[in-house]
Image (cartoon, rainbow, N blue to C red):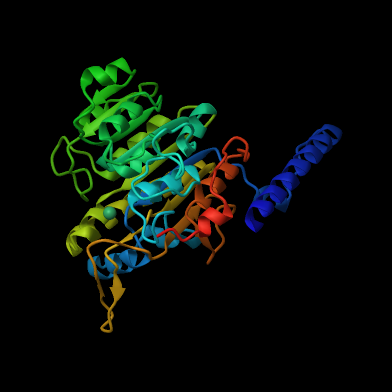
Amino acid sequence: MFNEIRLYIKAIIAFIMSIISIFTMGAAGTPTTPTPEEQEYKQIKNVIYLIGDGMGPLHLEKTKQERDITLTMDTFPYQGRSMTRSLSSSVTDSAAGGTALATGTRTYNGAIGVYMDDPVRAESHPKNLAELCLENGMMTGIVTTDKTSGATPATFSAHTYSRSNTKAISTQQLASGYDLIWGGTTDYVTQSDAEANGFTLIKTYDEMMALQPGTRSFAQFDNATWHLEQVDADTPTLEQMTMKAVDLLDDTDEGFFLMVEGAHIDKNSHANNDEGMTEALEEFDRTIAAVLAYAEADGETLVVITADHETGGIVLNEDGTYSFTKGDHSDADVPVLVYGSDTIIENGEVLNNYEIPIRIAYSLGFTAEQFPFAVTEEWASSETA
Ligand SMILES: [Zn+2]
């Protein structure tokens, strides 16, 4: 609550300062230097929201140690943590975790963008960030190394009571109006479905690279897009998908919203596969390095990295190594790493997961009326597990 008040106060100060600067400009005939307050409340135009599925803080440490690399993620200027619990359990799944990160609303495990108290009738549902941006004229995209109907991309593009409703998820994605939805193949997106909804269906790296701005596209790649190198000529890496998506979305004055998921950090953590997890995390970080270089050059892009939950219960051993302790999710807090705005998190701050999209919406200049969220303090703290 304190932080929301703080953000409002910053917004009011920035507004007053902008009025004053208009008058002083008019009087003096020359632009004035921005005040510290104005600089602090820098308006963001584009958002790139990267979700490392299952990525806890020790996933980063394990990867650095075992692959003998440094991570671009460690260089982000604002670093805090997120508490990931869902409303139905202290240990969330990717559906409830993604719903919190997409909509600012906590719900039950398995839910895709629906409220806890009205999942089946769906008389209303919380708006997600991509929908908010789309209805305000921004370009919108989703990139994942999971199937396009996977839980995380689904929470940014669909509303249904169960993550296993993959046909409903795909149908809603096709009707979404987004500019691009790219990921692994599902059974429910055909050429004619895509065309009927104004999408160009692409299946290969060459088809992706040939896309021109102004073309809406739905990608159904081979499910091997997460490796450090292309596994074959047809299959892009996460980094290649992400940077082509940025290139296509950076096409209007209104800006863009792009969600990027590194799904195989989670999948390999379930399997306690050290090699696979660290490879997936290195590829996720290499994608982040490319995104950061874009954001630094662009100057109006917010980059937020987080995870929906931790997977594998990684611990630090007495000998200084890191190992998995379970094959499932844990309730550990996850990293929140930010570049481009100081309004999302302060260094060392611990947030609830559902606060992240609300703060992103504010940083884009949206109001609480434009991005209503239903979670209350009582709901957030309720123990229903
Ligand atoms: Zn998982």
Answer yes or no: is residue 77 visible: no
Q: Residue furthest bottom?
A: 318
Q: Nearer the viewer, residue 324 or 182?
A: 324
All told, the count of numbered labels is 0
- 197 and 35: which is toward the camera: 197
Q: Quadrant of the C terminus?
A: bottom left
Position of residue 121 measured from the top left corner of the image (x, y, whole percent): 42, 33
In the orientation shown, which residue stands out farthest toward the left? 232
Q: Quadrant of the N terminus?
A: bottom right
x and y percentages locating residue 321 in the rendered image: 26, 77
Q: Is residue 110 rendered to the left or right of residue 122?
A: left
Residue 78: percent from the left, percent from the top? 52, 59
Residue at horizontal 36%, vertical 50%?
109
Residue at image position (68%, 52%) is 5
Q: Is residue 330 visible?
A: yes
Q: Nearer the viewer, residue 175 or 276?
A: 175
Ligand 1's image quarter is: bottom left
Expressed as whole percent of the image width and height from the top left, the position of residue 376 reads 57, 51
Q: Looking at the image, which residue is at 33% across and 54% down?
A: 285
Q: Where, by quadrant of the figure, is residue 374 drawn?
A: top right
From this view, report whether residue 250 is shown above or below residue 337: above
Q: Is residue 154 left or right of residue 44?
A: left
Is the residue 57 above or below the residue 23 in the image? below
Q: Quadrant of residue 151?
A: top left
Q: Nearer the viewer, residue 267 or 44?
A: 267
